[in-house]
Amino acid sequence: MKAVIFNEFGPSSVLKMADVQDPEPKDQEIQIRLAYTGVNPIDYKMRQGYLKDMMPYQFPIIPGWEGAGIVSKVGKGVRRAKVGDEVYGYFRLPEVHMGTYAQFIVVPEDLVVHTPKTLSLKEAAGIPLTALTAWQALFDFSKLQAHETVMVLGAAGGVGGMAVQMANWAKGTVYATASSEKHSYVLGMGAHKVFDYTQDDVQELLFAKEPHGVDVVVDCVGGETAKEAFSLVKKGGRVVSVVEHGIKELAPSGVEAGFIFVQPNRDQLHEIGALLDHKKLKVPEVAEFPLSDAASVQDKLETRRVKGKIVLKI
């Protein structure tokens, strides 16, 4: 099969197109002929060696953890899918080796979910990782309740856009940050008010509306922005980062903080799919590129100026 691989950690130039042996399913495993893969910040971080001390890995590495396609083979004992089914999923495996920048992937059947009926494979491919991250940040960690207030930092990206939508669906009051040219997009995702982090004093403008701060801050940026999150949350509130590993150590007394490293969850992804089918959530803006553009697309994503999601057509 054709795949994008890298044999050493480094810049995007280490990514190469290659011919790789097709993976074959074992018992309780499914082979998927991928149509599209979603592209996420974890992909370039993985290429840079970000995970080398966190997870076992084996070169050559095929990047990518989410995608959508058609079931092409099933192993013995598979019950949840059959050849020809359209499926999608967050396909993070215990070892960093076989990913979704490839024509085929083999995964345990527990990671595979049928695509939402109203979505194309292109639309479905960019949903699993970002949507599960937002879900686990808001509902598993933050335990968001109806009528609470939420600030999403970096709301125009994949996770941020999903977090805005989900907080709105959960009947929260949603504030967000994004550069001015992306305000209409973020408002369209369901934010009640968007602040321009490049121009505005975000704390001052937020406190004019929420004098004590918000109940929950979702940080999709990291770095100094993660530290600034604590100036926006009220006493007794929660700050959750999907970027900054050490955010818990930054928390002042009386504020709960934590980092989300998204976990595969078939039941949650099935529920998210139902919300998409019932128009409670919508697909973010999707930009498509060929698989051969993987290196330039990762460079583009690393600028942190991308709106919505990028997918690669396999």
Image (cartoon, rainbow, N blue to C red):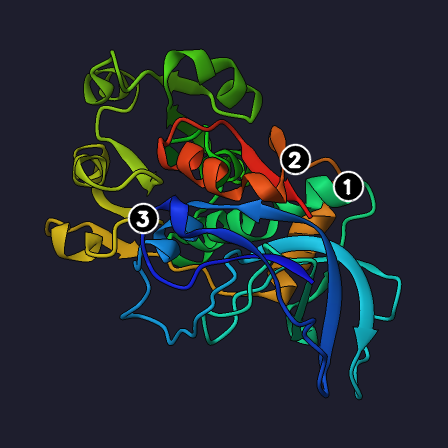
Q: Sequence order check: which comes first, mark 2 or mark 3? A: 3
Residue type at the position of mark 3? Val
Residue type at the position of mark 1? Leu
> 217 or 76: nearer the eye?
76
Q: Position of residue 137 (x, y in %)?
A: 42, 51
Verify CB contact (< 8 Å) between mark 2 and mark 3.
Answer: no
**CA separation in Å, label 1 and label 3:** 28 Å
Q: Residue 243: give its label.
A: 3
Q: Which residue is mark 1?
A: 119
Q: Residue at x 65, y 35 (%)?
A: 283
Horizontal placement of 70 versus 136: left or right?
right
Q: Position of residue 279 (x, y in %)?
A: 73, 35
Q: Position of residue 186 (x, y in %)?
A: 49, 22
Could you tell me how many numbered marks the image carries? 3
| Crowding near the residue tagged with mark 1, few <14, some 14–19, many ≥20 C-alpha atoms within 10 Å | some
Residue type at the position of mark 2? Val
Q: Sequence order check: which comes first, mark 1 or mark 3? A: 1
Give the secondary structure at mark 2. loop
Q: Residue 306: give its label.
A: none
**Considering only vertical position in the picture, is 297 above or below 269?**
above
Q: Sequence order check: which comes first, mark 2 or mark 1? A: 1
> 63 or 68: nearer the eye?
63
Q: Which residue is mark 2?
A: 283
**CA separation in Å, label 2 and label 3:** 22 Å
**CA separation in Å, label 2 and label 1:** 8 Å
* Quadrant holding the N terminus: bottom right
Q: Residue at x 40, y 52 (%)?
A: 14
**Considering only vertical position in the picture, is 68 above or below 109?**
above
Q: Position of residue 175 (x, y in %)?
A: 39, 26
**Considering only vertical position in the picture, is 95 above or below 68?**
below
Give the secondary structure at mark 1. loop
* Residue 163 seen anywhere in this rendered image of the structure: no
